[in-house]
Image (spheres, helix red, strand yellow):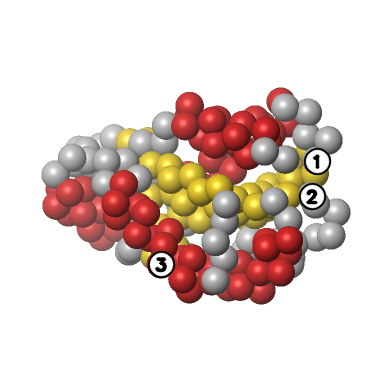
């Protein structure tokens, strides 16, 4: 039984939901899992963990700065432990090339090359946005041509079966 740490960065909450789902899958496979919002947790990976899965969301074409800083600070632990990254973005829903480029940029900025990477679609939470953000996100969605633009609804693009397979592949490789 492994103890797996899932630190994540989230802006609107979808990455947190994905981290919690991964933790549930990990526990269902007989391991311990603990999630932690990087903004509220210690800035180092505690010694009691056998593996780490870092989650980060993409906004305006890049992952959160504080997740990048966390990864840089914990590079030794991430290199020595089994580790993975999951990246959450709207691009992961239909524009995989862009989603992959975000991860490549993150890897370049941090120097960390995780053996396992998951690309998961995020969410458009129009009903939770303020006026300006709602219209900015609608414009981005409209420019992409494939995303929903009815701002009276929220849209979740996360493919939960893919998240489950990612988590299972990671724990099966331990």
Q: CA distance from mark 1 to mark 2?
A: 6 Å
Q: Is residue 124 left or right of residue 142?
A: right
**In terms of secondary structure, where does tag 2 sit?**
loop
Answer few, some or many: residues within 10 Å of disc 1's Cα (few below 14, many 20 plus, some between 14 and 19).
some
Q: Going 73% across and 56% down the picture, which residue do you hit? A: 81
Disc 1 and disc 2 in contact, CB within 8 angstroms: yes
Q: Position of residue 10 (x, y in %)?
A: 51, 55
Residue 88 visible somewhere in the drawing: yes
Q: Quadrant of residue 58?
A: bottom left
Give the quadrant of the C terminus: top right
For label 2, the residue is: 50
Q: Going 43% across and 59% down the picture, which residue do you hit? A: 103
For label 1, the residue is: 2
**In terms of secondary structure, where does tag 3 sit?**
helix
Q: Residue 167, relative to residue 102: is it above or below?
A: above
Q: Give whichever of discs 1 and 2 has the lower sequence position.
A: 1
Disc number at residue 82?
Answer: none
């Amino acid at each position: 039984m492994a103890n797996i740490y899932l630190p994540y960065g989230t802006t609107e909450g979808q990455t947190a939901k994905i981290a919690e789902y991964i933790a549930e899958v990990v526990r269902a496979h007989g391991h311990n899992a603990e999630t932690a919002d990087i903004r509220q947790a210690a800035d180092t990976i505690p010694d009691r963990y056998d593996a780490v899965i870092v989650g980060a969301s993409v906004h305006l074409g890049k992952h959160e700065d504080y997740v990048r800083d966390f990864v840089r600070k914990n590079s030794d632990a991430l290199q020595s432990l089994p580790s993975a990254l999951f990246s959450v973005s709207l691009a992961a829903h239909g524009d995989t090339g862009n989603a992959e480029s975000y991860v490549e940029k993150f890897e370049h900025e941090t120097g960390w090359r995780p053996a396992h990477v998951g690309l998961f679609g995020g969410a458009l939470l129009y009903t939770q946005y303020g006026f300006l953000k709602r219209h900015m996100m609608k414009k981005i969605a409209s420019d992409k041509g494939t995303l929903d633009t009815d701002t009276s609804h929220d849209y979740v693009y996360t493919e939960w079966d893919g998240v489950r397979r990612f988590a299972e592949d990671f724990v099966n490789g331990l």
